[in-house]
Amino acid sequence: MKVILASDHGGIHLSKEIASLLEELNIDYEDIGCNCADSVDYPDYGIPAAERVASGEFDRGILICGTGIGMSIAANKVKGIRAALVHDVFSAKATREHNDSNMITMGERVIGPGLAREIVKEWLGTEFQGGRHANRIGKVSDYENK
């Protein structure tokens, strides 16, 4: 599995925590920033990361900003992306099983590093269930492709 990681200034500390986790799990990843405390615009990081997941260069993506909301909105503008805003372990599991999410977004100002690590572990380790859920994802993709 190959993962892309990105954050804005509001998510740099949590992003470093997640990078550390990915290293511990021996998951191939690329961190595209930001790597500064100065104010930056989340679409400048979230959209390129989403494009690289949509192209197939990366299997999954993790985006972090202050709340996770801005990154989620930006990523979901990219065709083929199913980015889920996740702030608990149950939702991380459900969004993989039911929604086949290929990106998650989290908020550094919303959750702490311990919970974020658990969320990412659950999300990375959960498979899509398919079945009736595949039909639903298909409807979303059909609409997206109009």
Image: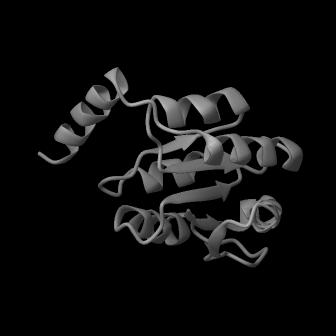
Residue 46 position within the rendered picture, expressed as x and y whole percent measured from the top left: 52, 64
In this rendered view, identify the residue nearer to me: 118 or 73. Answer: 118
**Which quadrant of the figure contains the N terminus?**
bottom right
Q: Would you say 115 lies left or right of 72 here? A: right
Q: Would you say 56 lies left or right of 79 here? A: right
Is residue 41 shown above or below 142? Answer: below
Which residue does the image show at 69% across and 40% down from the upper left? Answer: 122
Which residue does the image show at 22% across and 45% down from the upper left? Answer: 144
**Which quadrant of the figure contains the C terminus?**
top left
Which residue does the image show at 35% across and 58% down from the upper left? Answer: 78
Q: Quadrant of residue 87?
A: top right
In this rendered view, identify the residue nearer to me: 23 or 71. Answer: 23
Residue 84 position within the rendered picture, expressed as x and y whole percent measured from the top left: 53, 41
Q: Would you say 135 lies left or right of 48 here? A: left
In this rendered view, identify the residue nearer to me: 87 or 23. Answer: 23
Q: Quadrant of residue 119?
A: top right
Q: What residue occupies the far top of the structure in this picture?
A: 132
In this rendered view, identify the residue nearer to me: 110 or 105. Answer: 105
Residue 41 position within the rendered picture, expressed as x and y whole percent measured from the top left: 57, 68
Which residue does the image show at 29% across and 55% down from the upper left? Answer: 79
Residue 52 position within the rendered picture, expressed as x and y whole percent measured from the top left: 42, 70
